[in-house]
Image (cartoon, coloured by chain):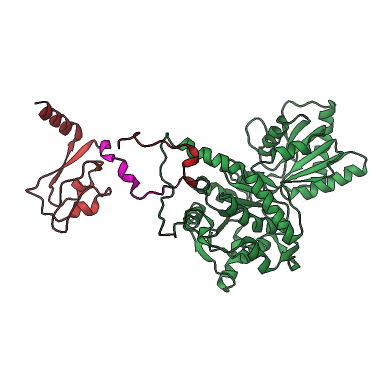
C-alpha cells in the first residue's frame, strides 16, 4: 500500500503534483486561463530540476498538440493542458493524434467558449472533443483530478488512444481542498518507466523506420477508421482494468459512473464535474423530506458507459439530465443525448428532461437543483407540460 | 503500378495508427500523370548549374555533380519552379497535351 499524506492543494497544484510524480518526458505549454497557473507550477518543478521533463513553450494550442504528436510518435511520454478556446484551437490536431493512435495526456481545465468571452467554467470546451476518439474522464474535485491524471497516463498507453482529463475551471482548479497525495515511488511504479517501446512504432527506433500521418485514399480510409472504431470499443475493459489496478495501490474504488442513493430512487439527477457535490447535497435535502431521489455522476465520458447508465436508470420514473453546455440544436445539451441513447437502448424508459445550468461559471446553488427536481416531478406526473425536452435552470426572465 | 492497382487489404491487416511500414512507398504514386505543363529543356542554353535541381520540390531532376539529366517525367508535376528559377531561361513550360498529341502522331505514323 502506498504512503499517503494529506495536503491542502488547489486543483491546479494537485495536477502539477501528479505531473511531477509521473515525470513526463515532454510538456508542451501555451498559457490560457485557467490552466496557465498549472503549467506555471510545473515550470517551477522543471526549473528546480525536480523533474526530467523537457518543457517546450509553443506559439499556440494547435502547436502544443502538434508538438505532443511529434514527441509521442517518437516514443516519449507527453502532456499538455488547455481550456476553452484553447481546446477549440487544438481540435484539428486532436483528430490527428487519435488517428495516429498515440498516447497523449491532455488536461482540460473546463472553460466556456467565446463569444461572449468568458474565462469561467462550463463544459462547452470538452464537448468539442466528443467525436474525436479521445478517451475522456471527468473529475469532481482536486482529489479526483490528481487520481485521474495518474490513471489516465496508464489507460492511454494501454489503449493506444490519447486521453483528456477534465476538471472545472476555477471551481476545482483554483479552490483549495484536502488532497491525499501518494508517494513518488508508488506513482512511478504504477505508470511504469517511459520506454519508447510503449508504442508499437516509435520513430526513435531507427532500425524500424515508419511513416506517420500518410494520406489514405477513399479505398483505404474506411478500413483505417473501422480499425480505430473496433479498438475504441476495447477501451471500456482497459479503463476498468486500470481502475482496479489503481484501487490496489490507492485504496479507492473508481468506476465509469458513481451512484448516490439510486437503489430505490424514483427521480434521479445526472451531472458531471464539480456540480455533483451540490447534487448530492440536494439529494440529501430531498431525502429528508421523504422524497425518493438519487444522483449519478458520469466519470468516464468517452467511450460513453451506455450499459452502466441504462442499468442505473432501470428503475427510475424520472431523470433530470444536468448539462453544463448547450448544443443549440433544438434537442438539448450534449450529455442529454448520450443519456437518451442509453435509455433508448434499455427496457425501462423513464421520463427524461434536460436542464442547462452553470454556463460561463454561473454559480450553482442548491435551490437550482431543488428547482430541477421539482420541475422534473411535476412534468413526470403531468402536473405541468413541456413543449421542448430542454430548459435553462438559472436564467433571469 | 498505376493508381488503384495496389492490393486492397482488409481492416485488420492495416498497422495500428495507419502507419506505413515500407520505405519509399511514395514511388508507387506516379505523380507525373498530374502534369498539365511540361518543362522542356533547351540543352544549348543549359550550363548544368544545377539550380533547377536545388529548387525542384519533387526531386524529379536526376543529376550528377557535373551534369543535369533529363527531367523524370514519371514524377514531375509540372509546377514550373525550375523554369522560373533557371538563370538562363533554358526551360520552357509547354502544355502537356501538345507533347502527348505529338508523341501519339509519331507513334501512329
The answer to whether A179 appears left or right of B58 in the picture is right
Residue name at image x 82 percent, y 47 percent: A280
- From the viewer's side, name the closer residue of A297 and B75: B75
The answer, for residue A171, to whether it is visible in the render is no
The answer, for residue B25, to whether it is visible in the render is yes
- Quadrant, the C terminus of chain A: top right
Residue name at image x 17 percent, y 32 percent: B100
For the image, the number of numbered tags is 0
| Residue A95 picture location, percent across and down | 52, 45
Q: Which residues are magenta?
A: B19-34
- Quadrant, the N terminus of chain A: bottom right
Chain B colour is: red
- The answer to whether residue A260 is magenta is no
- From the viewer's side, name the closer residue of B12 and A293: B12
| Residue A184 picture location, percent across and down | 66, 68
Above or below for A36 versus A124: below
**Residue extending furthest bottom?**
A48
The answer to whether A274 appears left or right of A66 in the picture is right
Residue name at image x 77 percent, y 43 percent: A296
**Residue extending furthest left?**
B44
Residue name at image x 48 percent, y 35 percent: A222
Above or below for A348 versus A181: above
Above or below for A3 versus B108: below
Chain A colour is: green
Amino acid at each position: 500500500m502506498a504512503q499517503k499524506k494529506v495536503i491542502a492543494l488547489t486543483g491546479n497544484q494537485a495536477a502539477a503534483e501528479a505531473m511531477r510524480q509521473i515525470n513526463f518526458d515532454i510538456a508542451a505549454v501555451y498559457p490560457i486561463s485557467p490552466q496557465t497557473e498549472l503549467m506555471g507550477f510545473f515550470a517551477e518543478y522543471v526549473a528546480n530540476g525536480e523533474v526530467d521533463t523537457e518543457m517546450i513553450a509553443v506559439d499556440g494550442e494547435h502547436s502544443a498538440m502538434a508538438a505532443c504528436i511529434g514527441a509521442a510518435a517518437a516514443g516519449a511520454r507527453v502532456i499538455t493542458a488547455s481550456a476553452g478556446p484553447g481546446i477549440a484551437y487544438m481540435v484539428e490536431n486532436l483528430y490527428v493524434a487519435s488517428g495516429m493512435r498515440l498516447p497523449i495526456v491532455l488536461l482540460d481545465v473546463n472553460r466556456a467558449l467565446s463569444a461572449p468571452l468568458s474565462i469561467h467554467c462550463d463544459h462547452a470546451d470538452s464537448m468539442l472533443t466528443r467525436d474525436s476518439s479521445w478517451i475522456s474522464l471527468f473529475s469532481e474535485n482536486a482529489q479526483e483530478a490528481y487520481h485521474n491524471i495518474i490513471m489516465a497516463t496508464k489507460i492511454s498507453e494501454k489503449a493506444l488512444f490519447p486521453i483528456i482529463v477534465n476538471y472545472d475551471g476555477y471551481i476545482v482548479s483554483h479552490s483549495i481542498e484536502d488532497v491525499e497525495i501518494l508517494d513518488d515511488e508508488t506513482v512511478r511504479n504504477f505508470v511504469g518507466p517511459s520506454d519508447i517501446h510503449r508504442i508499437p512504432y516509435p520513430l526513435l527506433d531507427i532500425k524500424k523506420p515508419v511513416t506517420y500521418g500518410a494520406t489514405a485514399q477513399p479505398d483505404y480510409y474506411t478500413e483505417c477508421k473501422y480499425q480505430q472504431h473496433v479498438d475504441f470499443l476495447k477501451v471500456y475493459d482497459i479503463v476498468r482494468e486500470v481502475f482496479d489496478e489503481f484501487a490496489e495501490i490507492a485504496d479507492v474504488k473508481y468506476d465509469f459512473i458513481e451512484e448516490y442513493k439510486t437503489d430505490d430512487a424514483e427521480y434521479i439527477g445526472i451531472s458531471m464535474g464539480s456540480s455533483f457535490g451540490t447534487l448530492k447535497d440536494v439529494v440529501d435535502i430531498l431525502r429528508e423530506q421523504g422524497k425518493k431521489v438519487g444522483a449519478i455522476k458520469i466519470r468516464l465520458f468517452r467511450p460513453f458507459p451506455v450499459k452502466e447508465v441504462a442499468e442505473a436508470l432501470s428503475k427510475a420514473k424520472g431523470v433530470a439530465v444536468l448539462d453544463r453546455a448547450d448544443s443549440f440544436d433544438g434537442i438539448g445539451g450534449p450529455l442529454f443525448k448520450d443519456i437518451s441513447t442509453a435509455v433508448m437502448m434499455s427496457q425501462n424508459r423513464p421520463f427524461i428532461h434536460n436542464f442547462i445550468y452553470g454556463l460561463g461559471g454561473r454559480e450553482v446553488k442548491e435551490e437550482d437543483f431543488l428547482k430541477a427536481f421539482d420541475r422534473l416531478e411535476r412534468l413526470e406526473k403531468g402536473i405541468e407540460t413541456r413543449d421542448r425536452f430542454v430548459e435553462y435552470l438559472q436564467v433571469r426572465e | 503500378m498505376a493508381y488503384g492497382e495496389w492490393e486492397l487489404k482488409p481492416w485488420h491487416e492495416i498497422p495500428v495508427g495507419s502507419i506505413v511500414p515500407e520505405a519509399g512507398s511514395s514511388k508507387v504514386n506516379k505523380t507525373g500523370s498530374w502534369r498539365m505543363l511540361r518543362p522542356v529543356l533547351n540543352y544549348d542554353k543549359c550550363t548544368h548549374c544545377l539550380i533547377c535541381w536545388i529548387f525542384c520540390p519533387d526531386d524529379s531532376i536526376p543529376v550528377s555533380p557535373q551534369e543535369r539529366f533529363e527531367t523524370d517525367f514519371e514524377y514531375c508535376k509540372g509546377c514550373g519552379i525550375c523554369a522560373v528559377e533557371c538563370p538562363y531561361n533554358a526551360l520552357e513550360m509547354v502544355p502537356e497535351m501538345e507533347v502527348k498529341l505529338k508523341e501519339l502522331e509519331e507513334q501512329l505514323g
